[in-house]
Image (cartoon, rainbow, N blue to C red):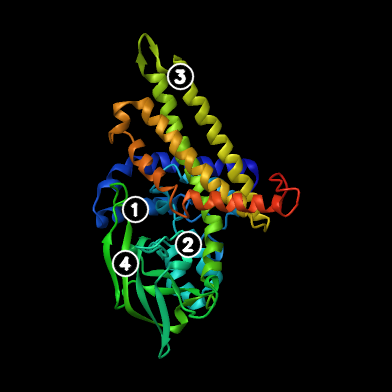
Amino acid sequence: MNAPAMTVLRERVLRFVEDEIYPAEAALDSAPRAQRNVLLQTLMQRAKAQGLWALGHPRELGGQGLPFMDYVQINEVIGRSFWAMQALGTLSLQDSLMVHRHGSEHWHARYLRPMIAGEFVPSFAMTEPGISSSDPTQLQTRAHLEGGHWVVDGRKWFTTGAADARYTTVMCRTEADAPAHAAFSLIVVPTDAPGYRIVRELPVLGINGGHYEIELDRLRVPADHLLGARGAGFAIAQERLGPGRIYHCMRWLGQAQRAFDLMCRRLQARSAFGSTLADKQLLQGYVFDSAAAIRAARLLTLDAARKLDAGLQARDEIAIIKVVGARMLHDVIDRAIQVHGAEGLSDDTPLGLMYRHAREARIYDGPDEVHMQSVARRVLKQYRDGGAGIDFGVDT
């Protein structure tokens, strides 16, 4: 998409987020699940009517086929509101691309097209209670073939969307004797299958955000419910996570920009000790630090996205933006709360909820420490092996 057309589309999405979603946020945050879903359906229909639905999904699946780099930039605007992903039909993108690439036409008709149409949300089960899920080779959920069916046993948690999904893609060990990273597969499990049980919804820092603990008790599904090849679970999951982390980082930039806007408006509107807060040098430092962090994180994220779009792995770049982006988001929102004083601690602004979601960012999709360690190890290996080191300005 050319630059003028992209500018127009970004502005249209921004107007929808600000005019349609912002006013509905309080109700969406507090409504019971059934009522919330009705409100979301209304927003989804408005998005479809305005031609803003499923912008990044392939056209053949009911989306609008926006190229990856264009969608990355649109995702920054969508990120301004937690509910915008679902209202604009982008919540399912990671899972829909995964099923599109690795699922049969049967799965496309049964699950993929209805999911992209907004009839239900996706659900992916990987992490488990009681183990260090940053090392996924420790996952305990298992499946074995028995009479033409996979029999799945285990317990998962932080399975987002399980209560509203028609299926959950489950990462489980299927290969007893294979090397660790070739021992796991992805199995599509209908949420209404006998043996699938939602144990509880997991409040996260006081937020009931649709994350669930589930139990799989001798759950049986036909053998063709395998997604991709046996033992390919890690490879497919990594393929899903790479673009997903870039989407996360762009949404974090949208959240940070919203917090920055609120902070700067507050600085101009509020007076203390004879002048506006905007005249206080210490608070001007908040503006500088936040502006610099947002711009730096944006450039890093777009650089990683361009390399991934060019077919490069961009492993270090993606790991770096995951850490830098999460820190940036936390710090910008934290400053905005500080500038708002007591009001920033209340629910009269969206900052408190944004702050809690920001804290999640340093843990999900891999804790910061794992990404920092992996980058440092690869960098140091280059020097240990006598190479010239890694030049982050060169595409590799």
Q: Which of marks 3 and 2 is nearer the N terminus?
A: 2
Residue drawn at x 61%, y 45% is 302
Q: Earlier in the sequence, mark 3 or mark 1?
A: 1
Residue tagged 1? 40
Q: Distance between the residues labelled 1 and 2?
A: 36 Å
Q: In this view, does 202 lie to the left or right of 150?
A: left
The type of residue carrying mark 2 is Asp
Residue 282 image label: 3
Q: Which of marks 4 and 3 is nearer the N terminus?
A: 4
Q: Kindly tell me whether residue 287 is visible in this rendering.
A: yes
Residue 214 image label: 4
Q: In this view, does 134 lie to the left or right of 72?
A: left
Residue 135 image label: 2
Q: How far apart are marks 3 and 1 (CA)?
A: 41 Å
Q: Distance between the residues labelled 4 and 1?
A: 24 Å
Q: Which of marks 1 and 2 is nearer the N terminus?
A: 1
Residue sticking out furthest to the top: 274
Q: Position of residue 58 (x, y in %)?
A: 55, 62
The type of residue carrying mark 3 is Leu
The type of residue carrying mark 4 is Ile
- Residue in the foreground of this view, choosing between 210 and 321: 321
Q: Distance between the residues labelled 4 and 3?
A: 48 Å
Q: Distance between the residues labelled 4 and 2?
A: 20 Å
Q: Where is residue 326 in the image (x, y as percent from the top left)?
A: 48, 43
Q: Depth-wise, is mark 4 or mark 2 nearer the camera?
A: 2
The type of residue carrying mark 1 is Leu
Q: Depth-wise, is mark 4 or mark 1 nearer the camera?
A: 4
Above or below, 247 against 170 in this view is above
